[in-house]
Amino acid sequence: MMHLATIPNMVGGHLGGWRHPDAFDDSVMNLEAVIEMARTAERGKFDAVFLADGNAVREMDRPELFAANFPSARPAMFEPTTLLSAIAMATTRIGLVATATSTFDEPWMVARRFSSMDHISKGRAGWNLVTASNADDALNFSRAAAVGREDRYARATEFYEVVTALWDSWAPDAFPQHKATGRYLDPARVAPIDHAGAYFQVKGPLSLPPTPQGRPVVFMAGQSPPGMELAARYADALFGAGSTKEDCIRAYADIKGRMAKHGRDPDTLKILPGISIFVGPTTAAAEQLYEELQSLISPALGVHYLAKQLTCDLSGCDVDGPVPADIPTEVVGGSSLRRYMLEMIRREDLTVRQAYERLLPSIGSPLFKGNAVEIADMMEEWWHDKAGDGFTVMAPVQPRGLRDVVDLVVPELQRRGLFRTEYNGSTLRSHLGLPTPPSRWAAG
Amino acid sequence: MILAANGGALGGHLGGWRHRDAHSHVAMKLDTMITTARLAEEGGLDMMFLADGNSVRQMDKPTLFAATSPSDRPAVFEPVTLFAALAQHTKRIGFVATATTSFEEPYLIARKFASLDHISAGRAAWNLVTTQYVEDAKNFNRDEHMGHVGYDLCHERGPGTF
């Protein structure tokens, strides 16, 4: 069975998404809009909604990019655990995954917020553990620069160990709450964690009993080698990334192959690579949506991304003039995608605007475009070839994009027996088919 | 007159939770918190308030611990996530959550409370506390509490974070 998560990104997954006529008119701090999307995903029987996050407003030093809404600038965002606690009240089954960073938060605080969210949602909480590599984030936490990768992952490893130990502080039967005898709790069914390590000294216990799904599900991204290693050791699920099917197959085999040395069954980690779905009732309708969106990419964003992909400076260029001829075809560390893009620009004599409209949408997460059958064909093939255990679906325009996936693609996946027609369990752990987590209180 | 309701689920009397009219189970029962918030709102109260701490206290005195005293807090919701949920079941009542300047980052506190204020359409308040309990300090890389340093940090972090 395929697993599906989605990112209820209010501005859509396409650079021009928020400008489309079918996009939300007001997506800034619009709680009703987020609830509507979570309910749509639940109607589609998705495993989870997932909120990416960061702790800084980025790109302020580039006013044109900033004004055009750069995707990771995050100028107006809910704090994810409070938002998902609210969404838990408007949904009953769908998993709720929030991001929190091990680099700037405290293990006690993270353990507490996510346990609380799991109790509030009755077993639907997930924690996406990230390490926060962005320098802008560091500047909000009494640091002068980004924390180095090695340091971040060493801290993340210990952070995870402290958080999961805190989640296991109490036995599930520790609270008899017996009015007649006055015995509220059983002191023999709790223990401090007494953690003392290189980064943290945490006594415990946590001020919450085990959660309805044992403990929250832990997601990671697992991009860099240390990230992949940490995921292979500890993650329950992974938001994978790769720009092609081959990349995803390679990453899938790599991470699952690292699990045996940690004594783990590869099936206990679910990998969900991100994909962008442009779907319509017909192939032509999907193509039309795509064309409409291309023309809505703000030049500031288009030029920025094109320059980044071509590793060159386009800041002085006329957007309707030619791409400068003096960009070298080969650069150190240049990708095959870069070479392919430059060849196409030269061959077809593209202007800067034509180049970014043509090339940008297929950069980043893989593009799945077509009618429902064509999309389902691609998803089935990727799933069958072990590019993922499912997908993290991004839709270009909200709320239309997610609604179209739920109304067009999901029924086709269900018809093929690839996706659930009803939730079988009530927890995120059960949706993902994950085992009961280990506990020091387990019998035997 | 301004009235706030203390939302503590165990009741305000040491024997409160054992009374026949008390909730039969309160540990991590969201429904009991929703009931309290709605009752307070029906009564026109200004706000619901939750005291808080970041440790489980009295574990070294098992008899006392088993009988639970009000500030032991062995099983409590994290207040800001709880109020974000309660805001969906109420329309008017204010929510006052406690957060400590001694162990939490100003950026994270500013974010959580601003987010709660958006989620509740303008009903959030922050009860700023400095933490004096040694037990809490031991959950945050410290052997004992911070003494006057806590108050210095408090002045630095108090104004201007929102």
Image (cartoon, coloured by chain):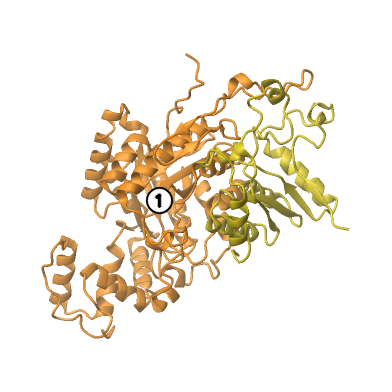
Chain colours: A orange, B yellow
Query: Quadrant of the image for the N terminus of chain A?
Result: top left
Q: Chain of mark 1?
A: A
Q: Which residue is mark 1?
A: A409
How many marks the image carries: the answer is: 1
Q: Local crowd at mark 1 within 10 Å, few (<14), some, or many (≥20)?
A: many
Name the one closer to the observer, A185 or B90. Answer: A185
Name the one closer to the observer, A80 or A144. Answer: A144
Query: Which x, y percent locates residue A180?
Result: 79, 19
Residue located farthest toward the right when viewing the structure as drawn:
B1
Mark 1 belongs to which amino acid? Val
Query: Which x, y percent locates residue A244?
Result: 24, 53
Residue drawn at x 42%, y 38% as measured from the top left: A160
- Can you see residue A386? no
Relative placement, left or right, of B132 versus A375 is right
Q: Place residue A177 in its image quadrant.
A: top right
Name the one closer to the observer, A417 or A53. Answer: A53
